[in-house]
Amino acid sequence: MDKKTASERADLNGNIVAVLQGGCFFGALAMGYFSRRFGRKKCLLASGVIYIIGSTIQSIAGLGSSQEVGLSVLYFSRFLGGIGVGMVSALVPSYVSECTPRAIRGRCTSMIQLANNVGIMLSFWVNYSASKDMAPTQMQWRMPFIIQLPESPRWLVEHGKLDAAARSLAHVAGVDPDEESVQATIREIREEFEGKDHLSLWQQFLGMGESWSIAHRCFIPSLVMFFQQWTGTNAINYFSPEIFAGLGVDGTTAGLFATGIYGVVKVVAVGLVIAFAVESLGRKKCLIYGGLGQALMMLWIGGYSGIHRSDKIVPASYVSLVAVYLYAIFYCVGWGPIPWAVSAEVAPNHLRTMALSVAVGVNWLFSFTISKITPIMLNNITYGTFLLFGVMCLIMSFWAYAFFPETKGVALEDIKYLFGDKWVVRSLQDAPLGRVFLGGKTAEPIEELRRKDDGLVREDSSVKRLDMKSAGQNDHPSPI
């Protein structure tokens, strides 16, 4: 590495980081088929085994071989480990959203981000300890590699295992399987799946475009995952020592220490958000406020880096360091945990696994893209990197304000009502001060839409019974 130019080092760093994201992309997409075929539980176990194998090979890459062979083995093992990571990242949001009561669904799905942040924080501190306490030998970089359920009730219903589905729901809710609330949920899930169970992979892809509303609901998970990556969070996660060095933190160990603090801030912030914000503020406000806060911090860092080009520490340098930590807090308020909750909620039940697999694939695809281009951007356009991410945060905040309806407290089977004819009106209606732009227009309450649907179902049932009765009369005409 020391003999390479800055550009070559940036390219190699990007490749080593990005190859794992490539594996994640394919692992996530594969779950669209395998989780429906074998169930969430078996696939979760398989993902763990695959990741362990990949991590083990990473820790021994290069032993007894040339640098070229060692680098190839490292690439392969990181790609293999990435497949395991992609599998679990596509499975867990769907599994959690399908198993948890709607009153705490957002909090539970957001716990995924908390677990991610705890893992990232631990990796930061392992790297810091290895840099500080170990001699600069091969073991210094190998050590971090070395250190590193009931089935879903909706999947059970889809496969006709109604008693097991009732027990799974009852276990989570802490009630008896015969409880009316459990049986009512089973009936709702069965109605949602009616005529749509056991769809092939191709049928699921076609089903995602069945109507404008369904296509919209299946597109949103991919969109929020795309936005999540373009907040720039992984640019800081993967290359924070270089970023802190650019802000005046001198030395590799000092940069890793600052990165470790960054990880702690993220864990504390996302824990507080899960405890107090995600179910009280709702998904929409968290996305808006979090995105605006991230935009402000990124624009400040970009502006400071563009104006102050020297390595000399000035008061504004400390403000910029604080801005990095505030950025982490705002990320944990909105675009860190909330996209996982939203992605697991909005797609129809019979297409959720496929839509979520595609969405997580998009997430890892752009994580790959960001990790590949960030060191190149930092080397070539420096402060422009942060300005770009800041502008993207403004765009996604506007989208959340104007085009995303609140899903807090809405049953998975009722999400379809949020994306009907007046979904933009409903989105603005749910936004802070959004009614100002509506001129008195309102969207119908979900309860009213549900009553109308129930009335249509009863009417259809009556017509069918009448048709059957008429058919019976024709088959057996009266002798009179």
Image (tube, grey):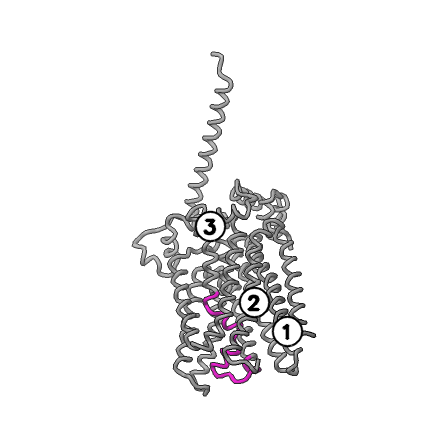
Counting from the top left corner in percent of width and height, residue 300 is at: 41, 76
Q: CA distance from mark 2 to mark 1?
A: 18 Å
Q: Is residue 349 magenta?
A: no
- Pointer 1: residues within 10 angstroms few (<14), some, or many (20+)? many
Q: Which residue is mark 1?
A: 144
Task: Name the amino acid, label 2.
Answer: Val
Q: Which residue is mark 2?
A: 19
Q: Nearer the viewer, residue 87 or 213?
A: 87
Counting from the top left corner in percent of width and height, residue 95 is at: 58, 54
Q: Is residue 211 above or below residue 368?
A: above
Where disc 2 sits, the SS reads helix
Q: Is residue 234 magenta?
A: yes
Main SS, magenta region, reads helix
At horizontal 63% and vertical 79% (from top left) the residue drawn is: 130
Q: Is residue 267 visible?
A: no
Task: Name the amino acid, label 3.
Answer: Ile
Where disc 3 sits, the SS reads helix
Q: Which residues are magenta?
A: 229-255
Q: CA distance from mark 3 to mark 1?
A: 43 Å
Dot label at residue 415: 3
Dot label at residue 329: none
